[in-house]
Image (cartoon, rainbow, N blue to C red):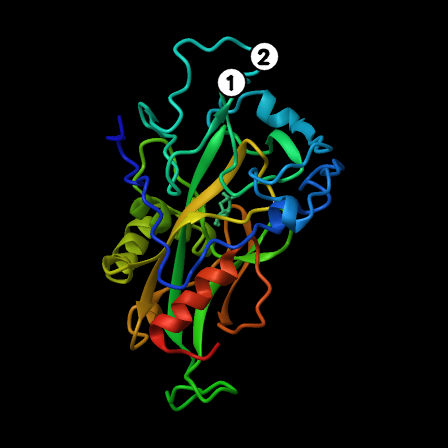
Amino acid sequence: NRGCMGNKATAVARLSPGMKPKCHIKARCEIYPRSQIKRFPVPDDKVPWTTKFPEYKPVDYTSESILKRPVYADPDIRTEKVDPPLSFNGCDGKINRVSHMGDYELVDGIPRNPQGRTGLMGRGTLGRWGPNHAADPIVTRWKVDESGKIIKGPDGKPVLQFVSVQRRDNHQWALPGGMVDAGEVVTATVRREFGEEAMNSIQMSSEEKKRMEKELDELFATGREIFRGYVDDPRNTDNSWMETVAFNFHDEDGSCLGKINLCAGDDAMNVRWTDLSGTLDLYASHVDFLEEVAKFHNASW
Ligand code: RP5
């Protein structure tokens, strides 16, 4: 049953033309995030499951905090009998286990990363077996000088700016995205996460929150889907991985964003406007989404 409640993430990978899924790199980072666990090294040519790799012995790691079963985490299906079994490639009530990349394989009942080997099995710090769904807002405006004239980049094209946050867990700059809550639609996730991470809505009074919701209405009314699929996230494992839907909310004349007060909150320690450019170094595969945004607006890259 694909008719998941809430999250309308579906099984179709909608990569824009020319945006081929790349071989994952960050999902093979040497040391697994927030641990001292070393991944089994996987050379580029051994990433696809279809390539034989008899010496492959991935490290088995699921963090203590995930094994303690916070609300968003699945049971350990390798050690516990789960009845009824988790509905992989389908939905468990409000939990969406459908991949944007199409059906994923199950090996001995355990999902297998559709992008290939990562050097680590288990769930690492991810809660779900299989896809862990997120959503990312890409809020953009043109960069202007004091007189309001749009500034051009070295390639002569106008420069776009986007709202970036500095992640508290690894201090890397990233899009202010986050996990889709059970039953939540992705369009609600992007708006909620933007509020929490880039406007610090969690610390607002109900009055301030109401005002913020109004300010965000206009900006979030027209979003364009930029990317839907696998994220090359350093937390990915052979059995659990991140997927996202990224939307671009563009304020052409700066009128919506003029009213918005950026303030870091929740998992973000800093927030700022950052110029789009091919030299950006961002968390996971966020740079790839921004390149698409630059192309769409014919902006400097
Ligand atoms: C990335 O992790 C997604 O693109 C999204 O930005 C983020 C969601 O995870 P948390 O920020 O909630 O840790 O893969």
Left or right, 35 with respect to 300, comes to right
Pointers 1 and 2 in contact (C-beta within 8 Å):
no
Place of residue 141 in the rendered image (x, y in percent of width and height, measured from the top left): 37, 73
Residue 140 at what x, y percent from top left?
Answer: 38, 68
Horizontally, residue 177 falls left or right of residue 183, namely right
Q: Disc 1 on helix, strand or loop?
A: loop
- Vertical relation: 162 (above or below) 193: below
Label at residue 30: none
Q: Quadrant of residue 235?
A: top right
Q: Where is the N terminus found, in terms of image quarters?
A: top left
Q: Residues within 10 Å of mark 1 (few under 14, many from 20)?
A: some
Q: Amino acid at mark 1?
A: Pro
Classify residue 145 by image quadrant: bottom left
Spatial CA span between label 1 and label 2: 9 Å
Classify 10 Å Cα crowding around label 2: few (below 14), some (14-19), many (20 and above).
few
Query: In this view of the protein, which residue sits in the foreground, 239 or 242?
Result: 239
In the image, residue 68 sits, relative to residue 136, either above or below, namely above
In terms of depth relative to the viewer, which is nearer, 79 or 95? 79
Is residue 223 or residue 57 the one in the foreground? 57
In what element is the residue under mark 2? loop
At a point 45% along the width and 87% down the height, the residue shown is 152
Residue located 45% across and 89% down the image: 156
Nearer the observer: mark 1 or 2; the answer is 2
> Which residue is rendered at x = 31% and y = 45% of the image?
188
What amino acid is labelled 2 in the image?
Thr
Residue ID for mark 1: 75
Q: Position of residue 117 (x, y in %)?
A: 60, 39
Q: Which residue is mark 2?
A: 79
- Please report the residue visible at 67 percent of the width from the left and 36 percent of the height from the top: 53
